[in-house]
Amino acid sequence: MSSRKSQALNLTFPLRGEVWLARQNPVIPDDPHVPRPVLIMSTNPRNKTGRNVIIVPFSTTLDRPFEPFHKFVPKGSGGLPKDCHARCDLVSTLAKAFLDPRGPLGPPLSDKYLWEIARGVRAAIGDSALA
C-alpha cells in the first residue's frame, strides 16, 4: 500500500496506533472535511494482509465533546497538526487505498492515548465489561 517503510521493522503497511490522512470518510461519503486524520486501530497482522483497516476518525470541530465517546488527543501526538477529539462512536473500516500514500503523520500514538481511545470504542458499542 504505502511506500513508507518503518526504519526499525522495514514494514510497508499501516501500523496500529499510527495517524494517517484518509481521502474518504466511510461514515459520511460527501464529508467536506477530507482529507481527515484517522487512527489505525486494527492489529498489525490484519493491517498487513487485509484490504482495509479499522479506523477511528478525529475531529477538530466538536463544540461539546461527549466524554465516554470523544477522547481528547493534543496537537503533536501521532503527528496531529491540531488538538483533536477521537470520535470513538464513529469506528469504521476503510479501504487502505483511501489512506494518504505519503504515510503516517508521525510516530504512533502513545499507549496512554491508544488505550483511552480503545475504551471509548468499547463504551460506544455498549461493552459493559470495561476495565
Image: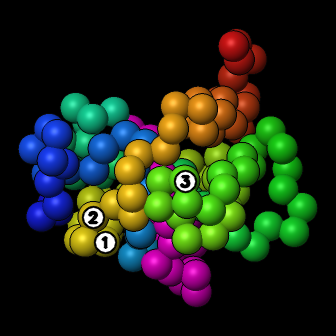
**Side of 3 where 17 appears, left or right:** right
Question: Mark 1 Cα within 10 Å, few/some/many (few <14, many 20+)?
Answer: some
Q: Secondary structure at mark 1?
A: loop
Residue at the spot of label 2: 103
Name the residue located 55 percent from the left edge and 60 percent from the top edge.
76
Can residue 49 be seen here? The reply is no
The Cα atoms of the two marked residues, 1 and 2, are separated by 6 Å
Residue 95: percent from left, percent from top: 30, 60
Q: Secondary structure at mark 3?
A: helix
Residue at the spot of label 3: 77
**Side of 85 where 10 appears, left or right:** left
Name the residue located 37 percent from the left edge and 40 percent from the top edge.
16
Name the residue located 66 percent from the left edge and 56 percent from the top edge.
74
Question: Mark 3 Cα within 10 Å, few/some/many (few <14, many 20+)?
Answer: many
Residue 58: percent from left, percent from top: 60, 61
Say if 94 sits above or below 118 in the image.
below
Residue 111: percent from left, percent from top: 52, 31
Which one is nearer the viewer's eye here, 77 or 131?
77
Mark 1 or mark 3, which is nearer the start of the sequence? Answer: 3
Residue interval drawn in magenta: 25-42
Which one is nearer the viewer's eye here, 35 or 73?
73
* Marker disc for residue 100: 1
